[in-house]
């Protein structure tokens, strides 16, 4: 067999193979099949540029019935493997409601499925409600709130104002409200006293905006606080002793203290800073009380227990001593 004859046979075989393949592909493309309830992921996206918020904003699963070839179905599977089918929606400014009922059959037939040659015949659900709102930017004040902690100075917050995107109908309301930068006691647990420190906290939306599609340019604020020392101490050089007894007993008995023990020396007190400050500034007078009873006086007591008169939560570091007394019956 000559070389030319062999070459001709090979060429003939290749031509027949190519023609057969083309015929098969053509037949396959023309072989239309009806597919029922095929799960197709879709996602609604803005068809009107930026500034729209769409809910639901994540992928949705739709059961789609369509007509197409096996190759078309394979192409659809390839497309959806890369992500959900994008379905653009636009704002309807004059509509009575922000909710739009999207007919899924029509939406899919104008999507990438049309480019694949797929004809959608039905969907489940047939209609999906979509909320489409336009967002506008407003400036909102930031208010710092410190819970359950005494501050020596007023808190400072940075930034003082934050740009927030809100649905257009809520713009006027949002401008009258404030974002909250809330500092809790836990946030300040490790801060030194009497030293300014900045604490980063999450911004909180006001109640009317919490369930709305809102976008903040920043989610945190820095609150500068100076924590007041929570407790303090003071040592009094002297604390006077007062006799506290019913007038009837004081008419029957005279109670005398030794001249060198009418006061208690070097009394150390501790307690809340504001209470200690009140004692130091003489806004609250403190003393020790001798409180004799009728039985003690009748028995001829020669020593008495002392009781401190102090602001709430202030305590004496050491127990008060018992003091000698001289009791004289007057009648």
Image (cartoon, rainbow, N blue to C red):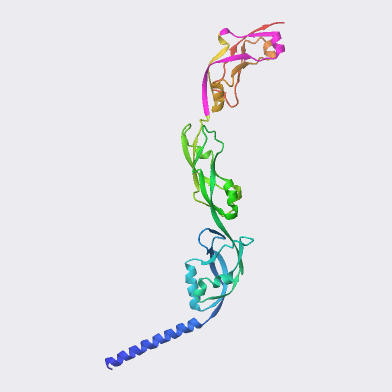
Seen at 55% across and 73% down, the residue is 109
Closer-to-camera residue (49/191): 49
In the image, residue 315 above or below residue 8: above
Q: Position of residue 15 (x, y in %)?
A: 37, 87
> Which quadrant of the figure contains the C terminus?
top right
Residue at the far front in the pictured view = 94
Q: Position of residue 158 (x, y in %)?
A: 48, 42
Residues in magenta, as a range = 231-259
Q: Position of residue 50 (x, y in %)?
A: 51, 59
In the image, residue 48 above or below residue 36: above
Seen at 71% across and 8% down, the residue is 252
Image label count: 0
In the image, residue 93 above or below residue 326: below
> Which quadrant of the figure contains the N terminus?
bottom left
Closer-to-camera residue (316/234): 234
Closer-to-camera residue (121/318): 121
Is 252 one of the magenta-colored residues? Answer: yes
Is 176 one of the magenta-colored residues? Answer: no
Residue 99 in which image quadrant: bottom right
**From this viewpoint, is residue 295 visible?**
yes
């Amino acid at each position: 067999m000559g070389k030319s004859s062999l070459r001709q046979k090979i060429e003939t075989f290749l031509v027949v193979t190519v023609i057969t393949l083309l015929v098969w592909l053509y037949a396959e493309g023309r072989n239309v099949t009806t597919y029922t309830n095929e799960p197709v992921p879709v996602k609604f996206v803005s068809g009107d540029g930026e500034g729209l918020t769409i809910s639901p904003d994540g992928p949705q699963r739709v059961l789609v019935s369509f007509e197409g070839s096996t190759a078309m179905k394979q192409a659809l599977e390839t497309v959806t493997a890369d992500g959900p089918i994008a379905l653009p929606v636009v704002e309807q400014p004059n509509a009575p409601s922000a909710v739009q009922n999207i007919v899924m059959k029509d939406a899919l037939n104008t999507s990438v499925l049309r480019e694949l040659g797929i004809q959608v015949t039905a969907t489940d659900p047939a209609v999906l409600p979509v909320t489409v709102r336009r967002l506008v930017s407003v400036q909102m004040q930031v208010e710092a709130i410190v819970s359950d902690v005494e501050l020596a100075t007023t808190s400072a917050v940075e930034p003082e104002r934050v740009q927030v995107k809100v649905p257009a109908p809520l713009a006027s309301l949002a401008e009258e409200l404030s974002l909250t930068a809330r500092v809790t006691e836990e946030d300040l647990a490790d801060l030194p006293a009497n030293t300014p420190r900045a604490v980063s906290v999450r911004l909180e939306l006001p109640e009317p905006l919490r369930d709305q599609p809102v976008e903040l340019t920043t989610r945190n604020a820095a609150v500068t606080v100076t924590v007041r020392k929570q407790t303090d101490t003071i040592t009094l050089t002297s604390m006077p002793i007062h006799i506290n007894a019913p007038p009837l007993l004081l008419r029957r008995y005279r109670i005398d203290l030794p001249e060198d023990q009418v006061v208690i020396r070097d009394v150390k007190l501790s307690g809340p800073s504001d209470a200690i400050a009140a004692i130091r500034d003489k806004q609250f007078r403190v003393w020790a009380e001798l409180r004799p009873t009728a039985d003690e006086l009748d028995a001829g007591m020669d020593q008495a227990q002392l009781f401190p008169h102090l602001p709430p939560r202030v305590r004496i570091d050491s127990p008060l001593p018992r003091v000698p007394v001289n009791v004289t019956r007057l009648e």
